[in-house]
Amino acid sequence: MTLTEPWNDARADARKRACSPICEDGGCADCKVRTISVCGALEAEEFAALEQLSHAATFAAKAMLFEQGAVAGNLFNVTEGVVRLYKSLPDGRRQIVGFALAGDFLGLALMDRYGVTAEAVTPVKACRFARSAFVHYIDDKPHLLRRLHEFAGHELSLAQDQMLLLGRRSAEEKIAAFLLNLQARYARIGSSSVTIPLPMSRQDIADYLGLTIETVSRTLTKLSRDKTILIVPDGVRLLNIERLDKLTAA
């Protein structure tokens, strides 16, 4: 997939987007994802200092949070929406390496430069932290460091899952694993349901699973025809989770 002008437009839009000081929705105390995010390790009295470092950022769909190769000046805690994370390949194509949901913390590796591009799939809200200030803040908080290490370990686990998905699995097995993983992640943020929102495009799913868009569409249609899933507006409903589980165990 080659990068076209809309991608460049999104880059320009992201650079223009300003961030407001402190969370707009009542601060850390009212944050809906606090308990499942990195911040969940903090005690109530520690949030006042964190709020002084935090800026509420909003991004329109297709706007960039940050770009691969750029100096990693900020970290982001996603509080609402879906973000695609991808690497640009030398030939102009992209490989999506993951999708961030509410509660995910972007930039945990604390590298000097971003290793991926983060782009909003839907409208996104996030807490933005200046990297230098955040690193200083966690210096004397071993409990927060432990939580960061846990999240880093989770990211490594997701990367390993991605390698497995791109390995020797059939298209049907890849799609089944993708849907079940997404269902589990939505459940973690309080959206436990057999109906899974799919705000990302078929092309996004193809770029994530190492398939073509035609194969993704054909496989979803086959699973629907077999009554394993039901394709609904903006998502799918899982009708036969047992069969999906068997596919992922193959």
Image (tube, helix red, strand yellow):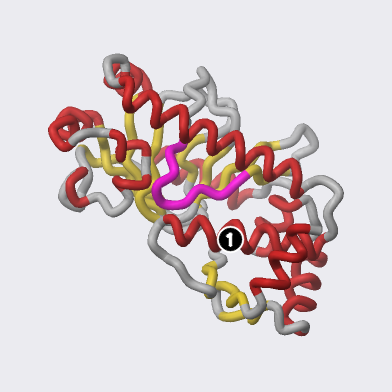
- State the residue in front, 199 or 15: 199
Q: Which residues are magenta?
A: 98-106
- State the residue in front, 149 or 54: 149
Residue corresponding to mark 1: 200
Residue 99 lies in the magenta-colored region: yes
Q: How many marks?
A: 1
Element carrying mark 1: loop
In-image side of 122 versus 209 (left or right):
left
> Which three-letter amino acid code belongs to the residue tagged 1?
Met
Q: Position of residue 249 (x, y in %)?
A: 76, 58
Q: Badge 1: few (under 14), some or many (20 or more) residues near its Cα, within 10 Å?
A: some
In-image side of 62 versus 97 (left or right):
left
Q: Quadrant of residue 240?
A: bottom right
Q: Position of residue 177 (x, y in %)?
A: 69, 58
Q: Position of residue 75 (x, y in %)?
A: 40, 31
Q: Residue at x 75, y 76 (%)?
A: 223
Q: Residue at x 54, y 63 (%)?
A: 183
Q: Residue at x 40, y 47 (%)?
A: 103
On the rendered image, what quadrant is the C terminus found in?
Answer: bottom right
Q: Position of residue 144 (x, y in %)?
A: 33, 27
Q: Residue at x 35, y 50 (%)?
A: 79
Residue 132 lies in the magenta-colored region: no
Residue 99, compared with residue 154, is above or below; it is below
In-image side of 58 versus 3 (left or right):
left
